[in-house]
Image (tube, rainbow, N blue to C red):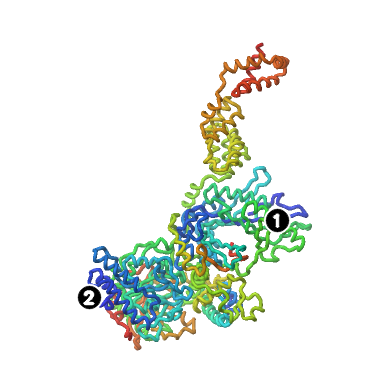
Amino acid sequence: MAAAPSPADVAAPGSFTTIIGLEVHVQLQTATKLFCGCPTTFGAPPNTQVCPTCLGLPGSLPVMNRHAFDLAVRAALALDCTIAPFTKWDRKNYFYPDLPKGYQISQFDLPFSSDGFLEVVDPKGAFSRRVGIIRVHLEEDAGKSMHDEAAGTADSRIDLNRAGTPLCEIVTQPDLRSPQEARAWLNELKLLLVYLGVSDCNMQEGSLRVDANVNLHIPRPDGSVAKTPIVEIKNMNSFRSVERALAYEAARQWEEWQATGRELGSAPKQTRGWDDPAGVTRGQRHKEESSDYRYFPEPDLVPVRVSADDLARARAAMGVPPAGLRRMLAERWGISAYDADVLVNQGRELVAYFEELAGLVGEGKVASNWMQQDVLRTLNERGGTIDAFPVRPAALADIIGRIAAGDFDTSRGREIFAEVLASGRTVADVVASLGIAAVDDDALDALCRELVAANPKIVADVQGGKEQAAAGLIGQAKKKNPNVNPGKVRAKCLEIIRGL
Amino acid sequence: MSSASPSLSRQDVAKVALLSRLALSERELDHLTGELSKIVGFVSQLADVDTSAVEPLAHPLDAQNVFRDDVVTPSLARESVLRSAPRHDGESFLVPAVLGETGAA
Amino acid sequence: MPPDPLQLSAVELVHAVRSGDLTAVACTEAFLARIERTNGVLNAFLAVDREGALARAAEIDARRRSGKPLGPLAGLPVGVKDALCTADLPTTCASKMLAGYRPPYDAEVVARLRHADAVIVGKTNMDEFAMGGSNENSAFGPVANPWDTSRAPGGSSGGSAACVAADMAPVAIGSDTGGSIRQPAGLCGITGLKPTYGRVSRRGLVAFASSLDQIGPMARSAADCALVLEAIAGHDPGDSTSLRDEVPSYTRALDKPLTGLRIGRVPEHFAAGLDPEVARGVDEAFAVFRQLGATVHDVRLPHAHHGIPTYYLIAPCEASSNLARYDGAHYGHRAEPGKGHRAEPTNGHRADSGKERDGAAAFESPLVEMYCRSRAEGFGPEVKRRIMLGTYALSAGYYDAYYAKALRVRRLIRQDYLDAFQTVDLIGGPVSATAAFPLGEKTGDPLAMYLVDMYTVTANLAGIGGISFPCGFTAGGLPIGFQLQGPALAESLLLNATDRFQSLTDWHRRRPPLAV
């Protein structure tokens, strides 16, 4: 299944290749939990979004949220996974205070989907990586345990609001080859899931969590490859942390290997936690018996069969994923792959804005330039979403159209854009209030004749063959009337001088 | 199935007790080692049943695809949630410190 | 003069209340008085809700007086097994673990009983977490059999069976995971129905083994069971395993003649181990069915004798997981820190041998200590045994040999029934190998106790329904039970056949000579 390694994947002697696989948990964007009707709203006071089912009270039973299952299928389809025609749920048994039933309802041997991939292409061409997806399954989240060490109390506090929240677990093949790739791939995954409405992927609120498995492949002089023990890294709370933690861990493993020569298989898989402020990974306690989860089929739920019709419906409802959208934008509007990437990475709403703008302007490249240089920059400065952006596509198209018609130049256009943005007035309004009326031909003619008469030196230079000297006339014209179009002034002045 | 030894050692039983989160006295441990060995020996008679062509049946129902709509239903009032808690602070359940221990992935 | 409620059937009681011949309050008071007189001897009730029951009865009477419609169980006192959640009464499952626990919600069956205007008089005793066949595993003391108080009432719904047999309530609710309705009904001389898996909602039934548990009615007759089943059966969207099939009128199908009914008789049931008195009673029951127009045919259930080992793998496996929630963290019993189990060093949790010598248990963390000690203190020996057995059978390396193997045999057992029901409509036979056994007789021998379910567990494994009713008495005056099993959703036929049997016999009308 794995393709032959590309030259970039094979480490040079004296160096190593970093082998990375990711385990991503994303919270599905549902109104309610996976097995009960409690809301999933973030930030509610502790233990106020709980019921007998998610509290695991005696006698309570789970009933599966259809929307959660549909969203999970959508995610798996977008990751090109095969959807199992028959899937069931299992109990994963372990004791922990944030797990009120003493087991987590998850999927063990028959996950609803498996064997997919998601490709990430660096727009600048630094790398291109097709990352295999081993499986995607649906499971419930645990609650939250909090321990305030500073308070020095012996107790931990347990909030079960999050218990039972629907999660998709996405497990990749160890196909990533650098911390940068891992970060880029996560960005692509997030973009995909946000595009499809599967998850908001908000890491601060815990709706996307990443664990990484990493080890090194180190070529030996004899041509064989040494593999370092696999380490699972946890507690990374941003994609930047993922990149930093992986880079740290790769360096640490390299040093450890040089010191000990220890290889894969010589020790059980180690778990290390990322300490972000310190910038290091630290070993976590391993409990031997904790891995005996005693999975067995969840008798309180019935299996799910997915028909071909169900899948067709799910595909139809899915929408175009980012990779397809990039290709489509490049083809439809003649913009570069890089530009398409920038636009698509901003999200579906921005792409819609762009497409509306490009359609009105009738020219993709100009629209794309305005999007990137003006709209995106302003959006970044101001914050907020494109949907709430005060300059709507019609207004921006109006400005771009007037520039094209020669009513004013691009820098004047930017001033108008800024004014529309600040005041919320229409383009026509702003143009009028700034006194930016098109200068009519008679006025232009009179102004140019006046300038030619007043500048004999420039006239002489032009007549002597130095046409660039006419620039001096343009500057003076703009001082006398800021609304004049420099190109027109230049053409008119040259015409008058030639006629002298 | 003949590979499964029907006799349990004291260590087996101690390990199962920890997995089960049951503190056992030495006397209980001795007692249970004997009892469980007997019971496991008894249930091991199933090894003699030919099930080579039989799929497991985890559930008597043939039902499938049971779902509910994604509609919010009322949660419990916090007082009634915490009423039965052995220890709480009015907002959260309190349990002995979980420092440094991990649950599962 | 109003009738004596204790002498009326449930059907007659409801009729009397609805017609105004008897007030619900008078009816409730009569049974409460009977409970007060007898519970000290029998220990059938763990909680009696005198005030709540009388208030409810008064409210039903008021509604009747104002001409408002009444439910199908109007004024009917019901004892509810303490495995069902009740919002206004403690729900303990007869475990120290849940002593005093009050759920914040009603089980679906409890809600349906209330909706039908039944009066819940109290919660009945049981084997702890429904694990047992004698009711001796209750943390709150055993129940005595009303026919001989030195004997066990059977279990695990022993309190429900005894309370009906002793007229403490006309009907009771039980739950049946391996025979826990049918076996105590048989040993107490009453009628008990375990419906098809999924016929009655399990929501709010404290789970023992989720793929086997089923709630059902226990009463003096099939007609009374039909009345209650009609009120509690039906689809519950809150239980994913609840059947959507429409609920027929069980009460209206009772008097259908049995002419042409084919009843299977399993020769293996009469092999060694079956008490001769019981065998005689069972055979006489077959004769009664012949008299009623039924025919009796030998059928084979080739894998039925594997029922007990299969059941004692599947049920403990599920139980080990279902009972993991009782860990002292969110509700239920929590051990006091640093107490108990200190005198005796504990297994497996020691950090080092030095501490062992002190006799102080050392756990890997205060949290693990809290878990282990809370569960050790909260659970009784049988519950611990089954949790350990289930944990062992599911643990790494053993799953295929035990749990998965049992699931395969389970399929064979179900297939036996499917095959048998190709040729017969129902299968008859004993409920238990013996009549009620003396309290304490089997408590020292878990395996002997497990065997009391040998005729009943297969119905749970197959998910089919079964009914148990009295078909005679031993020379010593103990009831003998007869069991009928039917294909999935054959409750109507089971009740119909039992009702016809009871139209020709009076075993079910006999009352224990209980001296109180």
> On the picture, is B37 further left or further right than C135?
right
Q: Chain of mark 1?
A: A
On screen, residue C232 above or below C181: above
Q: Which corner quadrant of the image does residue C35 belong to? A: bottom left
Who is closer to the viewer here, A442 or A465? A442
- Image mark 2: chain: C
Q: Residue at x 55, y 35 (%)?
A: A422
Pick out the residue farthest to the front: A151
Mark number for residue A8?
none
Label 1 CA crowd tier, 10 Å (few <14, some 14–19, many 20+): some
Q: Which residue is denoted by mark 2 in the rendering? A: C2
Where, by quadrant of the figure, is residue A331 drawn? top right
The N terminus of chain A - image quarter:
bottom right
Q: Amino acid at mark 2?
A: Pro
> Residue A455, how many percent across, how many down?
68, 16
The residue at the far left in this view is C1
Q: Position of residue A351 (x, y in %)?
A: 55, 40
Residue at numbered disc 1: A248
Camera sees residue B51:
no
